[in-house]
Structure formats: C-alpha cells, structure tokens
Image (spheres, coloured by chain):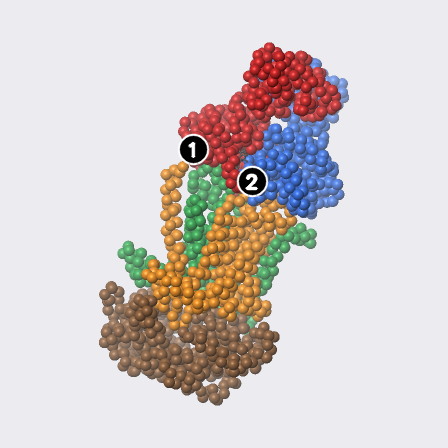
Chain colours: A green, B brown, C orange, D red, E blue
Amino acid sequence: MVQKLRDHMWAYIFILVPVLLFLVFTLYPIISAFMMSFQRYHVLNPEWIGFDNYKTMFADSVFYKSLWNTFLFTVCTVPVNIAITFMLAYFIFQLRTKWQTFFKAVMYLPAVASGVTISLVWFAMFDPTKDGMINSFLGFFGMEPVMWLSQTSTALFSLMLMTYLGSHGAGIILYLAAMGGIPKSLYEAADIDHASGWAKFSKITWPLLKPTTLYLLVTGVIISFQVFISVYMMTQGGPDFATTTIAYLIYQTAFMFYEFGLASAQSFVLTAIIVVVSIIQFKMFSTDVEY
Amino acid sequence: SSGSKDGASDVDVIKVWTYPVHGNYKDDIAKSVAEFHAKHPNIRIEYELLTWAEGPKKFDVALNAGSPPDIYYHGVSGQYVDTGLALNLDPYMTAEIVSDYLPGVLDKAKIQGKQYGLPMYQYQWAWSANQRILEEAGIDWRKIQKEGWTWSEFKTEAKKMVKDLPDGSKQYGIVTDATTTDFIEMLARSSGLVDVVDRDGKFIWNDERMLETLKFIRSLVDEGIMPKETAAIDPAKRVEYFYNGKTGIASKGLPYYDVMLETRAKDIDAGKIKGEKIEHVYLPIPYKDGGKWQATVGGEGYVGFRQKDDKGEQHAKNTFLVMDWLTKGVHGGNSASELCVPFARQSQIDAFKGKDSRGKPHNKIAAEINQSHGVPSSDLFVDAKVSASKKKFIEQAQKPMQQALFSGSRTPEQIFEEFKNKGEQLFR
Amino acid sequence: MQSKGKIAVLGVSITMLIIWGIITIIPLYWMIIGSFQDSYADASMKISMWPEVWSFEPFSRFFDKTMAWRWLLNSLIVSSILTITNVFFASLAGYAFAKLHFPGRKTIFWILLMTMMIPTQVTLIPLYILVIDVFNLKDSYMGLILPSIVSVGNIFLMKQYMSTLPTSLIHAARIDACSEFGIFYKIILPMAKPGLSVLAIFSFVFHWNDFFWPLLVTESEAMRTIQVGLAGFKFADTTDFGAIMAGATVASLPMIVLFFALQRYFLQGITIGAVKG
Amino acid sequence: MARVVFKNVEKEFVDGNKETFIAVKESNFTIEDKEFVVFVGPSGCGKTTSLRMIAGLEKQTRGDIMIGDRVVNKLHPKDRDIAMVFQDYALYPHMTIRENLSFGLKNLKQPKDVIAKKVKDASEVLGLDHLLDRKPKELSGGQRQRVAVGRAIVRDPQVFLFDEPLSNLDAKLRVQMRVELAELHKRLEATIVYVTHDQIEAMTLGQRIVVMNKGQIQQVASPTDLYQKPENMFVAGFIGSPPMNFIDVTYENGKVMMEGAQFVLPEHSVQALRAYEGKKLVLGIRPEHLFGEDITMGVPDTYSLTSTVQVVEQLGSENLVYFRVGERMITAKLHPDSDARVGQLKKFLLDMSKVHFFDVKTEKRTSI
Amino acid sequence: MARVVFKNVEKEFVDGNKETFIAVKESNFTIEDKEFVVFVGPSGCGKTTSLRMIAGLEKQTRGDIMIGDRVVNKLHPKDRDIAMVFQDYALYPHMTIRENLSFGLKNLKQPKDVIAKKVKDASEVLGLDHLLDRKPKELSGGQRQRVAVGRAIVRDPQVFLFDEPLSNLDAKLRVQMRVELAELHKRLEATIVYVTHDQIEAMTLGQRIVVMNKGQIQQVASPTDLYQKPENMFVAGFIGSPPMNFIDVTYENGKVMMEGAQFVLPEHSVQALRAYEGKKLVLGIRPEHLFGEDITMGVPDTYSLTSTVQVVEQLGSENLVYFRVGERMITAKLHPDSDARVGQLKKFLLDMSKVHFFDVKTEKRTSI
Ligand SMILES: Nc1ncnc2c1ncn2[C@@H]1O[C@H](COP(=O)(O)OP(=O)(O)OP(=O)(O)O)[C@@H](O)[C@H]1O
Ligand SMILES: Nc1ncnc2c1ncn2[C@@H]1O[C@H](COP(=O)(O)OP(=O)(O)OP(=O)(O)O)[C@@H](O)[C@H]1O
Ligand SMILES: [Mg+2]
Ligand SMILES: [Mg+2]
C-alpha cells in the first residue's frame, strides 16, 4: 500500500491542491448541508428531525411537478443544444481561418455582454404585445400575438427556446478546439477510403469528439437540472408552476421560506438523480480516444 | 467584526446595510454618519449601500449564516424575528424616543407587541393616474382623492377612459402587472379581508369576499378595462404603458411618482428623451360596494440585529443609538420628504418645518387622507409560524394563481377552490 | 477545386451561421449601441437599434459617478489570478486523472464530479460561514479568490482534453529522464495549448462576470468587482441606463481583448508528426 | 485506364521558419496502366511527397498530374479512385481493426456480405484474423502496419499507392506479403506505385524502378537494367547491397591504372573509352563480381588486385570482405566457405565483363 | 554494471473486449553488462513488450526484472538510466528537432556546450544537420526515425533500447547507421538491446541474438551458432533469408529417404540419428547449401536431387531458384551466372555437411 502510494506519489501531488481545496471549500459545506437535511435549520439552535424533511418533500405535489418540469426541460434542451452547438462548430470548421475567427468571435463574445442586456433582449423577444420580436415575426404570417411566458402552455417552452437561441459560443469553441486536434492524416485516409462528407463527419469527426461531447453532455445536464437564473429572471416559476424547476423550488424553499433543511433534502435528491444520469452518460460516451 | 476590535479596541464598529432609499440618500447618509462620528468618536459606523435587486439575497445569506449586519434597512418581519437574531429594542426605548414618534407609527415596527425596528417614514401604496386622461374622460379625481370610490364607481369611471388611440393601439382604464402580488392584496383588503390571515392568524382568504374580488378582477380584463395580455405584463412594462399614455391608471403608485415624473419632464425638456410629460394624480384603492376604504400602509426604517457570536450589551446599546440617529430629525426626515410620504417622527417634522417639500400639494393631501384609512398588515400580530405559512401561500398559491387569473386559464371559482385547499393545508 | 455539392453545403452552412450569428450577437450589439445613447431615464429601458444622437456622455457619467477604475482593477486582479490558478491546477489534475493510473483515480474523480451536481443554494450558507466567519476573509481579495482557485468542471474539461494526447510521448519523456512534473510542464502543457487557451478564456470570462459571490464577500465600495459595482449603479428614482450600458461595455473590453489574444491557439493540430500509427 | 503522368511537377514546402524547401523538382515520368512501379531513393528524397501528390493529398506547386487521360490537378482525393498505404499508417484510432478494414468498402456502398468476405480474406492473408475486434492501440507495430496494408488491399481501385508498406514486418512475413502483392497486382490489374527501401522488394516486385535523389529523378528503368546499367554513380551506388565499389583510375592507352595494379582493357571497352584518353575515371564493380582465388567460380585470374583484408563480416549465407584500394574501402562478397582472415594479404579477382566506368565530374556512366 | 535479467517474466494484456492476451510468457534470460543483444521474431511476438518492460514503461504481470544487481520492478523509468528508440518514434511534436535531441540531456542537467556539441555530432551522423530547426511534422518518415534514433544516441545511459530503429531508412543509410551503432557500443560500453527485422543487422550487430515466437523465447545464441545450430525448426526457418528448406524424410539403416532420392549418410550423422531408426524426420538445408551442377563451388555431386525449376528470381547478386520436393517448395540460392530457366529439369547438389535434422513432433533439432 505504502509502496503503491510512493509509486504514484506524483499523481497524488498533482491532484493535491484541488483535493485539499475540495475538502475545505466543497466537502465541508456539503457535509453541513447534508446534516441540515435532517434538521429544521435555525442559525442558533437547529433541531434534529430525522427524515421529516424528506417526508415533507415527498408529500409535496409541487416537488413532483418541479421534478417533471426539470426533467422535461433537460430532455428537450440538452440534446438539442449539443446538436446545435456541434452543427455550428462543424460549419465554422469548414471555413478559412479568418472566417473561423470571425464566427468564433460572433458566437462567443455575446457571453461577455452583461446579464442586464441579455435579459432585456429576452424580454423584448417575448414581449406579449404584437410589438414583441417573436410576436411581430408571427404577426408577419398573420398569427395572433402569444403571451409566451405567461400561459402554462408556452411558458416552459419559452424557457427552452431561450436556451436554443441563446449563446452556444462556449460549446462551439470547445468543439472547434477538439476538431483542430484530430490529426489531419485521418481525414486524408478517409478521403482515400472514399468517405463522403457525411461519412467523414459521422465516422471520424463525431466519434473522435466524444470526449468533448461527454463533457458538454454531463455539464449540460448538470446545468440544466440546476436551471435557475432564467426561471428567476423570466417567470419566477409561474404561471401555475409551469416553469417551477427543482432548482427554483430549492431557491424558494431556502431563501424565501428559510427552510434550509428542506432545501437540502431537495438538493440531495436532485443530486442523486444527476449522479445516476451522469453515470449512464459516462457509460454511453466513454470511449477513449487517443491519437 | 472581530477584525476591527484589535485595531482600536475602544472603538465599536456598527455595521449598517442600507439601500438607496431615495435619489439623494447616498449623500444624505454620508452626512448623517459624519455628524454621528463627530459626536460619538468611540463608535464607528460602517455602512454599505446595497442594490434593491440583489441586496435582499445578500442579507438573507448573511442572516441565515448568523452574521447579519447590526442594522438593516427594511420593514420588520416575522421571519427575521424567528431567527432569534433580531434585536428586541424595548429595553432601549426611552420615553423621549417613544414620544418623538407620531401616534401609531412605532406599532408598524412591532411584531406581536415587541419593538424590533425604528420606522423612518410611513409608506403607503395606492394607484397613480395620468391627469390628462382622467380629465379627458371627465373624471372628477379631486373628489376621489378626498372621498374614495367603490368598485362599481371605479368601473364606470375606468370604462370612460377605454378607447382606441390614433396609432391603432388601445388606451386602457387601468394596467397592472402579473408579477407583483399587491394588486390582488389591495383589492382583497378593500373588500374587507385585511390580509391572507387575520390578526389571530386565522386564514381568511377562504371567505366568499375573496371569490368576489377574484371575479371583479377577472371582469376588468373581460370588459376590456385592463389589457388582455395582463398576465404577461411585468412591472417595467406596466410603467411603460403609463408613460406612453396607454392607460389612465397604473396600479401600484406612490406619492413619490410626483418626483419621478418631474425629473422625467425635465429630461423631456432637455431633449434627452422623447415622450409626453405626465401630470401625476395619486388615487386611493376603490373599496367593495357597501364596504369601507382600507389603505395599505406600513412603516419602513431600520431593524436591529445581533450576531451568532453576540458582541455584548454595549454593542447592542450602540446599535440602538445609531438606529435612533439614522431615523430621527433631518437624518430620517429626508426620506419622508423626498418620497413625499408622511413623516414618522416629530423631530423630522421639526427639522423640515418651513422647507420646501417636494411633490404636488393635492397628492400630499391625498396621501395623508389615505394614510388615515390605513390598516396594518397582519404580519405584525401573528407568530412566526403563521407568518411563514403566509409567505408560502403567497408564493405557492397566490402568485401562480394570479397569472392564471389574468390569462383566464383558470376561472375565479377554480382559483378560489385552490386558495381554500392550499390555505387549509398550510394553516392547519 | 470544389464540387457543386460542396459549394451548396458551404452556402447552407454560411447562411445558417449568419442567421445564428445575428441572433446571438443582438445583446452585445444592444449593449454597445445602448452605451452611446443618452436617452436614459425611461423606465421602459427601450433602446433603438440605431441611436439618433451619438453621445459619449454615458461613459463619462459612468466613470465620474463611480469608482469604476478601482472596480475594474479589482476584477482584473481577481480574474487574472483565478484564471492562472484554474488553468494550472485544473490541467495538472486533469492530466493526472487522464493519464496517470494511480490507485483511487476513478473514485476520487467521481467524488469530485459529484460535488458539481449539488445545487449551490444549499452549500452557500455553510460556505459563507466558512469564508466569512471562520477564515475571516470578508471584504478581501483572499475571500474572493480562495474558494474558486480550481473548479471541478475545469478539471473535468482538462481530463477530457488530455485523454486524447498520445501517451507514448509521456513514455518518451520518462525515458528522457524527465521528472513527472517536467513531463507535465514541458510536454503536456505545450501540446494542450488549444485546450488551455480555451480554459483560460472560459475561466476569465466566468470570474469576470461572476456576481453573486463577490456580492456576498465584498462590503466596501473599494473592494467591489466591476459586476457588483455595475449592479449597484442603479438609483432609486431612475436607472441611468446609458451609463449602465457604457459600464457593461467597458467591462466587457478585457474579455474581448483576451479572446482575440488567445483565439489563435484554439485551433491547432499540435500532435501531428508525433507518433506513427 | 489508369496511366499516371507527372509533367514538370514541382513541390515546395514552406516550413515553420518560413524557409522554402523544394521537395520534388521538375519531375517527369509516366507510369503505364497496370504497371507496377517502385520508387526508391534515400530517406527524405521526395518519395512520399510524390505519392501524396498522386493521391491529391498534397497539391503540387507547379506542373500537371494526369491519371488516365485527365488532368487531375483539381480533383479531390476521394474522386481519384485510389487506395493508399500511408507511411505512418493513419489508422482510425476509434475503430476496431474490422471497422478499419471495412471503412473504405462501406463508403463504396458494397454489400455487407461482400465486405465481410473481403475483410476475412485480407485479414487471413495478413495474419490479423484473431485481432479483428481490437483497436489499433492494442496492436504491435507490425500488426498496425499490416492493418494499414489491409485497408488498401481490400479495395479494388485504379491505382494503388504503397508507402513502405512492409518496413516493420519480419523477413518471413515480408516474403509472404511480397508474393501476395504480386498476385494482387495480377488479379486486380491495377496500376501500383510502391515505395520501399528494401532492394529485394524493389527488384522482385517492380516492373520498373524510379530512383530519386534530393527531389530529382535519377533513372527510370527495369530492375535488371538498373542493376546492370546504372546511369550514374548515384544509382550505381544506391542499388545493390552492399553497394557497388568505386575505384579511381586513369585511362591511358587502352589500360586503366589504379593504385597497385593496372589492367589492359578488352577491345570493346577501349572503343568506348576513347574520349577519356589520359583522363581520370571512376571504375565501378559490384561486390559479387570480386572473387577470392580459392573459389573463383570460373573467373579467369587475368584481372586481379592484391590487398590486405581489413574486415570480414560473416553473414551466414556469404562473407563480406573489406579491403582498401587507394583511399577507398572496397567490399567483396565472397562465398561463406572462402577463406579470408583479417590481416591476410589476399588476391582478389575482378570480373572485368561486369565493370562500369563513370565520368569523374558528371558522375554519369560512360557509354559502355 | 548493467546486466539485464528477466526471471520468469510474464506480461498479460487485457484488451478493450476484456479478453486476456499473454504477450510475453515465462521469459528468462540474462543480458550481460556491455553486451549487444538483438531481439528478433515474427511481428507481434512480444519484442516491443519485452523492451518496454525493461524500460519500466510496462509493468510485468509476473516475475522479476533486474538491471545491474537490483530488482527494478518498482523503479521508475527515469531512474533506470535508459535510452530508448520507440518503434513509433514518439517525437515531441511541439519541439524543433534540436529541442527533441537535447531534451534528455537538458533533463540530466548537462552543460549547454556539451549539449550543443552532442546534438551537433549526432545530427551530423544522422544527416539531420540541416533540419535542426524544423518541427517533426515537417520531416519525412525516415527523417523522423533518425530523430528518434538521435534522441537516444546523444545520451550516455547504462542501457540502450532500440526498437526497430532503422526500419524506415534506405539501405545505404542503414549500413552507415549500423557501423555507427557498433561504434557507439564500443565507445560507450553500454548494454544494448536491439529489436530488428533485418537479418543483416541482427547478424552483424548482435553478440547474441534472442529469438522469440508467440511470446516465448526460442533460442538465445551467438549469430553463428544460431545460424549453424538452430535449436528448433522455428529458429531454423526464421533466421536466414530466404529461409531454410525443409524436406520430409524417413531415416532407415543409415540412409535418409525422400521423394525422388535417397542418401547414405556420413558416419557421424548415422551415430546421431540412431534413435530415429525407421522414423520420420525433417531434413533442413539452407538455400545457399544447394548448388547447380554448373557452379558447384567444390561440392561433390554425391548428394543430388533432380527437379523441375518452378520459378527463378534474379536478384542481381544472386538468383533464387524454386523447385519442389514432395509437397514442399524448395529454394536454392545460386550464383547469378548459373543457368536456370523455368521448366528446366535441373540437378541440384546438396552440401551434406550443412544439413540439419529435426524431430517431426517436437520440431527440436536432433543432436547432430
Ligand atoms: N494493449 C494491448 N492489448 C492487447 N494486446 C496487446 C496490447 N498491446 C500489445 N498487444 C499484443 O501483444 C503482442 C506483443 O506485442 P509487441 O508490441 O510486443 O510485439 P512486437 O514483437 O514488438 O511486434 P512488431 O514486430 O509487430 O512490433 C502482440 O500480439 C499484440 O497484439
Ligand atoms: N511540411 C514540410 N515542410 C518542409 N519540408 C518538408 C515538409 N514535409 C516534407 N518536407 C521535406 O520534403 C522532403 C521529402 O519528404 P518525403 O516525405 O517525400 O520524403 P521520403 O522520400 O518519403 O523520405 P522517407 O524515405 O524518409 O520517408 C524531405 O526532405 C522533408 O524534410
Ligand atoms: Mg516517406
Ligand atoms: Mg514492436
């Protein structure tokens, strides 16, 4: 055992700082939060209440509704967004270097715009009157204005639409970096092997980008399961819980109702779900690609 | 904080988190603090101006982590008291201070009879209207300001303002937003339901009057007095309707709109922005026919806190001293003055005697009349548990349902059922 | 050189890119346009697509009324340090997880990864207590920096990236008597340049835009980061929209500069010629 | 019809330091349809570059390339109907061997059973049948190279390009593969361009051999011609292992004179060398045309040299014996049973019918 | 002291399909200090794996490896004082050739001028001097391989490991490099382990040769011993090119009988084969020990075979003539001047002093 540790001493040194920081700044808060989930949280004198928080949570219909919303949101956004990201990256990759730079900038730089402007744009997009951007577009085809964010039938979809039309810049850049790393010789071999553009795409590019895809998928699912900001900004969970996601519910529970114990319980259930999903993703996408 | 203790052991640091209460508050508080320092060299005030949008979150985290600031600008809240960190001010309330407060004002910062905050001014909410539109529709707004109006009167008057504008858009009687909860609350209050719960903590929104309120609101949309896209209007959008002359009345108004609209008029004159200059009329909330005028009022000011690691009695005393300082006389009075609302303390009145106050006289008078019809929120009387349940009710029943009400995706009856169920569940 | 089919495909993709580009660039465009428009004070915050009068007023107001330079400096210090630490430690750990087969590798990695999956809302309070009360780092650079020195997401990203690099080069370096750290520093880092520069720009943008933690940790005006400062630049009566946009525009400049400085490393087939096979 | 024609083809590279390097210079040749042509030349002389230009993977800087009767300068590699073995294999790292082998066939939309059969046949020939489900990373170097070869030979293209396809295989396998490739050539009637460093491969497989040096083509000829009539000293020295020996001589009056010996030339040589009267020349003789006195294999001892044996290398099937003439080290390839010891003063017989003469300056062969 | 010892070393791989594959089986050998040992064997037999285990890049599944007198099982590669040429080169793609060459030396903290000198010397030897400022991707295949070799030979380690270091070089350069490596060995007095598929390299460079097959060591012996006394049919067939011919014979009464001929054996052979009376045996004879009647090189015609010539390969320095005995195809390596035409009925003489006999079942050499 000791010998093993010594053999791999360097590996342990390499992960030392992250692990130490992790122990202090992540694990400690997580353990506290975990303990909280068995307490009625109170700054001064928390009270142990066993599994009551979990019981409360599972008895709450809003909890199930929010789980369902979150699930729906994740299923409808993550794959679509990865597809969009990948497609855009692939398009950009075909271009000459100068144009690549241009489009990379166009796709990525909006990420630097402040949150204020971004939310402004979205409110203008979803403006319920006929002057709203999307509504005037629909009006062009003679359609009635839609109250995007305020009716149960379209609210969640509107939030999804935000992710579709939102910035994919980060993913695009990651994909482009990975595409650049694929040895040119493989494409040469594929050319010799008569591969059509599609075959090169589906048999070379796509499989070799699996590490990046896995990253985007896992982080995408994590982010999507924890979607909060857009809900908070655009709909506050409404109307009629149509956009109450689990993360928004946790936020409400914690910071509106000060029920940190219950919020922790909700969080750990959410975490368990994400872990399971992630394991599946790792199983599905874990091929080691090494050039 | 403990860090400053070793710097100068005899100097006690009092931490204040406040907000830009009004346009000049940043300068005003700086002055107040400087004066305080001159008087009390052994106490140092460290204050931070939070933002309205993000400040509450920062405070929530700090409070629940056990290290809130000593003084926080807010109304009192059962939630705060429940943490056990709110500072009970009763031991420090001298007769002098008590008598400096105008009658009834201190009560607005008490929870279940205990003093936790010192109000700086008396706030109130009602509606704001566009004088031109009122007058074009031939509405006698001065009378309404004085005598109030009933729901049916309101409806008749509001209908007069509804018309098509030359640019093809519509002018509405009243516009509200679907995000903030006060529209329903104010109308319910004026139907006689003072709050979600009464002072004894009993759930009262299961009363038939609630159903009538809901029906009344729905009829406003159905009859075209309110826009049919109301469900999708947010506060900013509501203001936009008002500024653009698309509505006679904007729900949720403050006397302070006088000041805001004045500034805007100046900008229009200066050519910085385009638009119509609007003359502001402050209007009370109409009450249910046969009922009585019930206004939404309260007191806002400073609330005191201790920390998880308590800094001792002297620190608490000093905290109170600073709270008193920041609310009394010119230091607290500037807020009431700027915001065009009634003063909270006699010393404030004295400090501003003879000075020009801002705002239109008729609106000021209207605000004072409205104040006299005020009923305080039940929050001040019920225990923490009820107050928490109330908050939950608002978030998990009222908010989701009100959008449904506006959009018509649920009928008033369904919503009322939902209220009853949720109320039963939460206030068992 | 290109067949008709290829030109058609190219045409479609360029069209798509342009459409998408326009959609995504709107916020940025509005931000910049908005900062040259002096028609503030309208609560509706309407911006036109093209200002009638161009004005630099908002910029001067922004700089006059705030401690903008100080905030920018704070952000620059914090974001730069965090970018460097994240790039360094994440690539170091990512390399270890990708290429060094030490016992516990998978377990440790998964434990780390799992912590990404816990919503921050519930860990926020304990973390706050830790940083503010226990370590007493309120209102300090340390408080801003320490909890974010390296993030698990970045380690994961680097692990994925490093896993594609040829292992035989690591072996070659071992034979060349290179120390383990030397291998990382002299062989892996240069080969991972595209990944590193992507990570660098991501980290920088993330920390530069980070709002909530700096809001919690900072108290004095002089310690605020630009984002916290910007958010605070709203007044009770009116929102000086032009100045906010101007501030946002100024705040985005360092990120844009960094992007263009690093972007040429994003695309590099750097392992060509390394191995046969 | 898959003639491959180079017309004044040149290729320049600009390297990372912005220096221009001419990898292929004024290259002109025609590879006939169905011909098997081998490219040989020192490392770095431009063989791979030439192949890559035929494949269209590298665009020539100047000149035209034709395949069949079309100028293909602008034709995409995948439309040139070519199969290629890359010098660095370029296997698809994420595919199994089976997938690597069948990728090209799938792209050509061949029926599944045909693919399966071809992959099976090729993998048997290459001894890869038990490795089909592995990934390239899990193979040995030689196995990877065989996969690279397999990927080409399952195909049925107009032109095959092989870039040192057997360099990492053991001798036995190489012999076997050589036979297979020869058969493939017969069966498919494809044009084959083949780069190798192995002289035996070049001699046995090539119908013609192209010898390159420093980007320039030195000679294009059949193996025997190349061996027996090298056009210049480079080709003479390059083909044959151990290489041809060069001896500095002076021609005078029907005689060549060298250090320690002088020979009267036969009549036909004298004719050819008339122009070199009194001048210096280089005489070339291959190691196998030098004999010891003990095992002469019928060579008369008219022309002989005597020198001290410097080194003896026993290779099993033959002995290499090194000795000096003037400055130059000379190698003789003697029968393993011939006696030769280091330090021995030994008499070597020259087969004068097999000598070559080269011009000292141009290094070109004199017309003999 | 850099002896390298393998004690019962085994290496198992688990491939992507979770199948276990034994790449090296019960390997036992000792490489003496300063010895030059060559590993040969068919592709995929475990040579690279053995080398990598010596280097510490691959951990053996079982058994011990010693370098000097230490068991190095747990020693980190960088502490083993080894230089290695990788079969797949593993050049640092981001470094120039100069940096690639000097990297190891810098790590060893050698003074700058020493490094510069060593790099200069090595690059001259390798013909890389004009390429020092290029990156690997700007080199040809052979040039890359030379860089890989250069990276090892600038070093001064206890043990050199060369994995097919010359496979992509042309014949001339290879000869040159062979000489350089032999000199390097003398100069540095290092232990050298060398993998090659080139028999000439193996024979000329190796003091001893290790022959492997399917992960198992077949024979460890000096080149001449290996050639003259192969321990089993595998070694006999593997060493020598073209390989040894095998003929099925039956031994009876001092005579071997085969299809179309029978020979009386000389007395000493009879002694050795006594145990095989009446049994089947395999007779082995190398191609160069078969002669045509015309050029016999002194071999008596006592033992002769007559058969029809099937194929003739003219290699320039020799002719390979193929004919059948029974099922087996036999190769004779005849002098290029000997006459042999396809279809000709030709008499071949056997040098009976050079034949080998192998047991049919064990394939082991009989004690002759
Ligand atoms: N990762 C692996 N998984 C499974 N089998 C492997 C792996 N690596 C190597 N092998 C197998 O181990 C055997 C020995 O491989 P090794 O590389 O030592 O062969 P080699 O003798 O060097 O062959 P070559 O001459 O072709 O380079 C081969 O059959 C190979 O397929
Ligand atoms: N990208 C490049 N930049 C500069 N020079 C290059 C580049 N690629 C190849 N060269 C040079 O071009 C010449 C020809 O290279 P090529 O690969 O054709 O050689 P080759 O004949 O195949 O050699 P080998 O037998 O070593 O594979 C070499 O000298 C090489 O250094
Ligand atoms: Mg080449
Ligand atoms: Mg090998």
Mark in front: 1 vs 2:
2
The subunit letter for the residue under badge 1 reads: D
Residue placed at 75% from the left, 43% from the top?
A: E69
Residue C37, can we see it?
yes
Q: Amino acid at mark 1?
A: Asn
- Mark 1 — residue? D73
- Label drawn at residue E134: 2
> In the displayed structure, does residue B182 sit left or right of residue E278?
left
| Image quarter of the N terminus of chain E | top right
Cβ of disc 2 within 8 Å of ligand 2? yes
Residue D334 - label: none
Q: Residue furthest top?
A: D267
Q: For the point 56% across and 41% down, which residue is it?
A: E135
Dot 2: element = loop
Question: How busy is the neighbourhood of tag 2: few (under 14 within 10 Å), some, or many (20 plus)?
Answer: some
- Amino acid marked by disc 2: Arg
**What kind of element bears circle 1?**
loop
Indicate the quadrant of ligand 2 in the picture: top right
Query: Which quadrant of the figure has residue B210?
Result: bottom left
Where is residue A105 drawn, in percent x and y? 43, 52
Residue E27 vertical position relative to residue E347 in the rendered view, above or below: below
Q: Is residue C269 left or right of residue B195?
A: right
Residue E149, image quadrant: top right
User: Does A287 appear above or below B21?
Assistant: above
Give the image location of residue C99, x and y in percent.
59, 49
Between residues B370 and A94, which one lies in front from this camera angle? A94
User: Do the residues at pointers 1 and 2 share their chain?
Assistant: no
